[in-house]
Amino acid sequence: MKIAQLALSFLISGVSAATAADSPADAAAVSFTNEQRELSNCWGDTPPAAEWHPTYSAGWTDGYCRFTVDCNSPGYSTELACCKGTYGGQMSGECLRRLPNPPTTSPTGAGGLDVYYPDYDMTWSEGHCVNERPLPSGRPTYGSMLACCKGAYGGQMSGACLAKLPSPPTTSPTEVGGPGLWYPDYATSWADAKCLNTWPAPFNTGDRPVYDDQLACCKAAYGGQTSGACIASLPSPPTTSPTAAGGLDFWYPDYDTSWADASCKNERPLPFNVGDRPTYDTLLACCKGAYGGQISGACIATLPSPPTTSPTAVGGLDFWYPDYDTSWADASCKNERPLPFNVGDRPTYDTLLACCKGAYGGQISGACIATLPSPPTTSPTAVGGLDFWYPDYDTSW
């Protein structure tokens, strides 16, 4: 009889060990029971009393506790104690769900973690450190709450993390090993921004320029800032905004200002990505290329010795197009720069006469042909008749 019981015990042990490897928690439990039990005397002459045991064969996610006699797992006096001791932190809540009166949340493990980690479920300004189970994957950990607050929330103005300490300090701790570098504040508009050295930095290494001191940062990142917001934050600010560390050696059109009032610039920082705007070697070339025909003369007025009239564009277009900004009866054709439409949005013609005939054939005022170097005495007919017919409603029926 004892031989049969011993064989049965070994058989149960083999099945449990095979199924227990479903998860790290199961494997640990098997290791524990293997070390503690004595297989040859598990049953003995008198079977052990029934207790609540984890069901390792169900895996971690679907695991639960059952009231049984089991030599291969730890026993608990109550089902709740079994769930908390074996399945603490089980996200599915399967073990708790089987309780006669299950709680609304999964119980924490027996005791908190011995490390602290930042709570990323809260905003950084209000965040703090916790040691709750289970530990989220990929989260940095610290040996104490203070170390966590300093490492993850150094510079937090609200002091929310420090306020959780048993004896919180009166000010927020500085970052652990924060470098004395300065960087531009891209979260604020350029006109009102300044340089910061708050750490942890809100960007990855290499994503923003950094400077050894605040003045160098203001000059390089906010040179030409009219508001003087950056230099105003210096301990002893100068009376005017510093110029950039050298002006650009090319000029570009100012697309932030209306075309009629705009001019060309060579200011830092460049307000566009390289290649997104045309650039010119000189201010005059930029005014002629980008603002040729500008009636206000705003661009050329910025020249050191501006001419008395707005410069013509760098060469007229080699084709003509109808002027849709003027009523048809008074309009003519143009070849001016810049082109007031996207390529393909209007018909174009090789000559002014072809444009007048194609776009304004039949124009009674003769406004278009009047712009020809040697205009005829009457408006030209359109190029070819229509390929369809229509009734003349201007004459009595």
Image: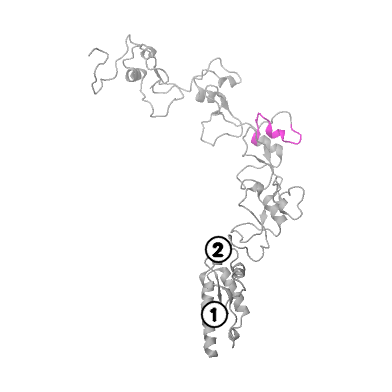
Label 2 secondary element: loop
Percent position of residue 115, x then y:
67, 61
Tell me: 138 left or right of 332. Answer: right
Three-letter amino acid code of the residue under disc 1: Ser
Q: Quick check: 379 above or below 98?
A: above
Percent position of residue 107, x then y:
61, 63
Percent position of residue 340, x then y:
44, 25
**Colour setting:** one colour
Select label 1 or label 2 by which is in front.
2
Q: Which mark is residue 356?
A: none
Q: Are marks 1 and 2 in contact (CB under 8 Å)?
A: no
Q: Which residue is mark 1?
A: 13
Residue at the spot 67% in from the left edge and 54% down from the top edge = 129
Along the line of sight, the residue nearer the viewer: 343 or 190: 190
**Which residues are the magenta region?**
221-237
Label 1 secondary element: helix
Q: Which residue is mark 2?
A: 93
Q: Quadrant of residue 91?
A: bottom right
User: Which is more N-terminal, label 2 or label 1?
Assistant: 1
Does the segment drawn in magenta span residue 230? yes
Asked if one can make out residue 336 in the rendered structure from this viewpoint, the answer is yes
Percent position of residue 155, x then y:
70, 47
Q: Quadrant of residue 254?
A: top right
